[in-house]
Amino acid sequence: MKLLRVFNRELNKTAVEADKLPMEKYMKNNFKFYGVRSPVRKNVFKQVMKNYELPSAEEYKFVVLKMMQHPKREMNYCGIDLAIKCQKKYSNIIDLDYISTLIVTRSWWDSVDSIAPNLLGNYLLNYPEMIPKFLKEYKASSNIWLYRSCILFQLKYKDKTDADLLFKICTHFKDSKEFFVQKAIGWALREYAKTDTDATYRFVDTTNLAPLSKKEACKHRK
């Protein structure tokens, strides 16, 4: 737990009291903040990682989860960054159940939008045989953040994207009334349009998407 104490000390040290309430308001008062803006927090993470070793393979999951459960949001962000950094070293240890646990821990769009395309996306790129299990579990849940993760996990795949799978997932969730699900569909399609414009807009034009999804998908359409 040494890293958690170090991050807590450094985040407290760099916190700006005047920034705390605006940051909490921006996040709809769902979370408490130290008052450390993103560029400063990223620098804190960089400096701590420069001075301290990564947790061992035996302890890193525990450390990351404790950071994700911390009441201050910046600590949660550092936990996600640590998980992403550890994944590169311990890629054979992290598993779908653990990633799912992180997704549903103090969930909101800001955490999910980092975990889904990074941790989950990288995991499924390395272990594509796990995709059927992942889809079955996430679709069967009642958690909108798992739904959003289904939609966004290929966000950074570019030409490695399984377009048929992306379109099937978007079709599966297209009737959802959840704002964050509708918006995710639009975002995922807008991003894939950068790789295959014709296929993406053909899907958009022939699918009865929610207005928000269609608006987001076509944001950069000429």
Image (cartoon, rainbow, N blue to C red):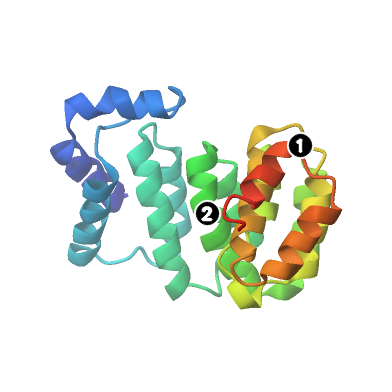
Marks 1 and 2, how far apart at CA? 19 Å
Task: Give the residue at mark 2.
Answer: 115
The quarter of the rendered structure image containing the C terminus is: bottom right
Total labels drawn: 2
- The residue at the point 46 percent across, 25 percent down is 30
Instruction: Reply above or below: 83 against 184.
Output: below
151 or 50, nearer to the observer: 151
Q: Is residue 95 visible?
A: no
Rendered location of residue 46, percent (x, y):
24, 60
Q: Amino acid at mark 1?
A: Ser
Q: Is residue 48 visible?
A: yes
Which quadrant of the structure image shows residue 68? top left
Rendered location of residue 59, percent (x, y):
42, 59
Instruction: Reply above or below: 20 against 11.
Output: above
Q: Secondary structure at mark 1?
A: loop
Circle 2 residues within 10 Å: few <14, some 14–19, many ≥20 = many
Task: Give the residue at mark 1.
Answer: 142
- The residue at the point 66 percent across, 43 percent down is 215
Q: Amino acid at mark 2?
A: Ile
Q: Is residue 154 left or right of residue 24?
A: right
Q: Are marks 1 and 2 in contact (CB under 8 Å)?
A: no
Q: Secondary structure at mark 2?
A: helix
- The residue at the point 82 percent across, 39 percent down is 175
Q: Is residue 208 left or right of residue 71?
A: right
